[in-house]
Each structure stands twice: as structure tokens, then as C-alpha cells.
Amino acid sequence: MRKQSSYLSEIQYIEKDKVNSVKKKMKTEKFFHYLAETFKAMSDPTRTKIIFALCLEKELCVSDMAAIIGTTNSAISHQLRTLRNMKLVKYNRIGKLTFYSLDDIHINHLFAEGLKHVEDL
């Protein structure tokens, strides 16, 4: 007598219209790699604090971020380099100061949705 679970695993049901529809819209491997790297860049707690602060204040210098987060300017600069390389933040130099902001509104929206998800847990 067969176990029910092995019987169910042998059943294949494919809705060809759905499969074809999604396959036509599927992005490239490079696209998904970049998307995964974006989420990976946001996976560090210090980087998420930086993004959170920039969502609230729009523009901050390294020293202000270090004071907000409670770490060193060097640690903040290191994390900002990663965020800048992933095009999640941009900078503007005014004299000797460098001010950082989110690269575009999409980062703000993405982060806001993540916050909603965690707050609803």
C-alpha cells in the first residue's frame, strides 16, 4: 500500500497559461542578481538604521548619522560606501562636509514597505 504523501508528490498539474504568462514577464539573471544584491545591501542593521534616518531627515552628514546611530564616523563611512556602490544613497559635498540622501524615492518606498511588514508582525 502506497503512502498518500508519495502519491501526491507524483501528481503534476501545470496551468500552461499562467506559466507562459509569467515566463514572458520574467526578468534576466542579471536583473535578479542586482535585485538580490540590493536586498543584501539593506540586510545589515547599521545600513538599515542609516536608511531609516535618511527616510526621516532626507539629508544628513556622516557625523550626524554617527551621533544618531551611536557609532564612529569611520563605521558610518564604511557602510555608506556599500550603500553608495549599490546606488541606494547619493552624496552632495558642500565645502568640507559631505551630505548623504537616498538615491531616489523608490528606496524610500521599498524601505517603508519593509517597515510596514515588520510592524504588522
Image (cartoon, rainbow, N blue to C red):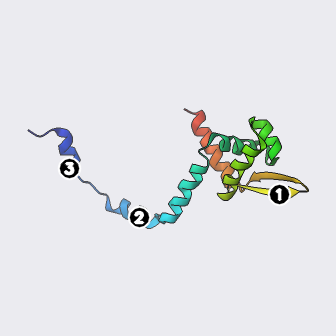
Rendered image quadrant of residue 17: bottom left
Residue 23 marker:
2
Q: Are marks 2 and 1 in contact (CB under 8 Å)?
A: no
- In space, the residues marked 1 and 3 are separated at their CA atoms by 59 Å
- Horizontal side of 112 relative to 3 (left or right) equals right
Q: Residue furthest front?
A: 74
Q: Position of residue 4 (x, y in %)?
A: 17, 39
Q: Residue at x 69, y 48 (%)?
A: 79
Residue 50 drawn above or below residue 81: above
Q: CA distance from mark 2 to mark 1?
A: 41 Å
Q: Dot 1 surroundings within 10 Å: few (below 14), some, or many (20 or more)?
A: few
Q: CA distance from mark 3 to mark 2?
A: 24 Å
Q: Which residue is mark 1?
A: 92
Instruction: Tell me the mark number nearer the camera, choosing from 2 and 1.
Output: 1
Residue 73 appears in which quarter of the rendering? Answer: top right
| Residue type (three-letter) at the residue carrying disc 2 | Lys
Camera-side residue of 2 and 120: 2
Q: Nearer the viewer, residue 46 or 55?
A: 46
Quadrant including the C terminus: top right
Identify the element where label 3 is drawn: loop
- Res. 55 image quadrant: top right
Q: Amino acid at mark 3?
A: Glu
Work out whether 73 lies above or below 16. above
Q: Amino acid at mark 1?
A: Asn
Q: Disc 3 vs disc 2: Cβ atoms closer than 8 Å? A: no
Residue visible at 23% across and 47% down?
9
Q: Identify the residue position indicated by label 3 in the image.
A: 10
- Image point 63% across, 40% down: which residue? 45
Local SS, label 1 = strand
